[in-house]
Amino acid sequence: MFFGYDSSCMSQVDTNDNYLRFMGTDSGSARDSAAVGGLVSVWFGGFGIGAILVGSMADDIGRLKCIQLGCLWGILGGALQASAQNFTWMAFARIIGGIGCGHLNTIVPIWTSELADSGARGAFVAVQFTLALTGGTIVYWTEYACLKTQSLAFAWRFPLAMQLIFLLFILFATPFYPESPRHLIRIGRLEEAREILQRVRVNVPESQIEDELAEIVGAICLEANHPPASMWTIMTKSDKLHTRRRILLGAGVQVMQKFTGIDFISTYAPEMFTLAGYTGDKPSLLAGGNFFSYTASLALAIYLCDRVGRRRLMLIGSSLMFLVLIAGGVLSHEVISKATSDPSVSSRCGGAVAAVLYLYTFIYGSTWLTTCWVYPTEIFPLVSRAKGTAAATVAFSLAGGIINEIVPYLIDAISYWVFVLFALLNLVMLVPIYLFYIETASRHLEDLDYLFAHESPFFWHAERAFAQMKSEEGSLDKTGNPAQ
């Protein structure tokens, strides 16, 4: 909920006259617009720094302590944002807050994936993002209510301060949660890991827990021949585990999720509803209503993520978003071209554009939103999982910062063509997804080391080799080595 809240909290702060006056950006010039966009984008810079911090320390101090450190960064950043008095103050506060959010949003999915049953990892992350969108809905309507009922100063300072409630809860609740069993085994605490697996697996025989322990130990033995490397090394040097290829896939899925166009519709939703011909309070109300359908879409994601699989959901999602966005571009053209000559047709087309925006976010939420966050936590070997996931999150922050900076200019410059632009990007993305992305759903994390061990980057080669390995008469023994 904190992630959803924090990532959406600037949506109505940016247009608050009191906030703009404090930031010195209330003249309406192009420079001021760039500065306001910059305060949104620097959060993504902090987000990337937070991810890098996770990559450097999560394996040393454990997942839970890493979560608590992220809370401390977020609390400091939130307090500074709520009390900001000028542009420089706010810029540093946004960076610090971004560090906390990036820190938490890198380590929590790792912890979840390492703790969850192989057949439920996607559903677990889908539940988390249902709560994230709930957080985004809360902050949107909190800010809207404050704008309508409170002073302008209160309307932006209070929502920024309210995020501390989530962080304080996480900080004090974390010690009551179980540590990742995979991390515990890695540092030699096998009995504690066994006890945690017994507590978090539902209705499974003891033998299955022992098999899972053996798989984890086998994977750690396999990785022991490849000592931990720095984040720079795993990104630049090839190894037998093909970590660099996995980073390209993990970072790629995070960059592609930004290229789906979700930010131009979710972050700048009021502007998009304005393109649909709505004026006054209607764009803000429609944008707020879109959060409800967006959140509801995660119920479908919870059901589909592990049943349909990550790869197929990405292919289905991009195909449907391509079609929907093309329709949105055509309808937006009609809204603008018929605004004076035939207002009744323009109004009907405007309603259709609004329906397209709602449908688009529902498709994205039920297909891509969960997949792009769970996939990077699954594909890396344990020895580099924290660093690899951090690298993927850095890619998310860079892509998010760039997209959020240029989207306002795109909307102003090309109007309804922005629909067509992102539709074509969705179409192009089908190619790398089909060629290179291996299915990870319902597979043990340790099996993925063997899937990604194949020399070929094409998914069908890896799948064929893995199926052959599993079907061979001398299949793997408990140490991860071919049985004799």
Image: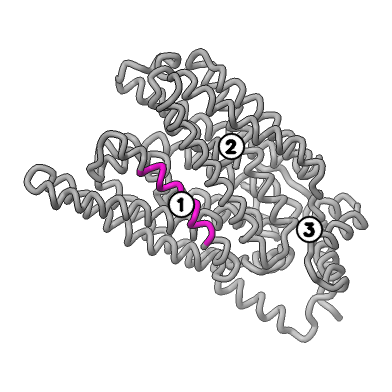
CB under 8 Å between callouts 1 and 3?
A: no
Label 3 Cα neighbours within 10 Å, binned few <14 / some 14-19 / many ≥20: some
Is 290 covered by the magenta stretch?
A: yes
Q: What's the magenta region?
A: 286-299
Q: CA distance from mark 2 to mark 1?
A: 25 Å
> Circle 1 — which element?
helix
From the image, state whether disc 1 or disc 3 is nearer to you: 1
> Circle 2 — which element?
helix
Q: Which residue is mark 1?
A: 294
Query: Can residue 457 be seen in the rendering of this structure?
Result: no
- Write the residue at 77% across / 42% down: 64
Describe residue 174's horizontal placement relative to residue 36 as left or right: right
Q: Answer above or below: position of 200 versus 35.
A: below
Q: Earlier in the sequence, mark 2 or mark 1?
A: 2
* Percent position of residue 337, x then y: 13, 47
- Write the residue at 70% across / 53% down: 112
Residue 263, quarter of the rendered image: top left
From the image, state whether disc 3 or disc 2 is nearer to you: 2
Please, what is the three-letter code of the amino acid marked with disc 2? Gly
Residue 230, quarter of the rendered image: top right
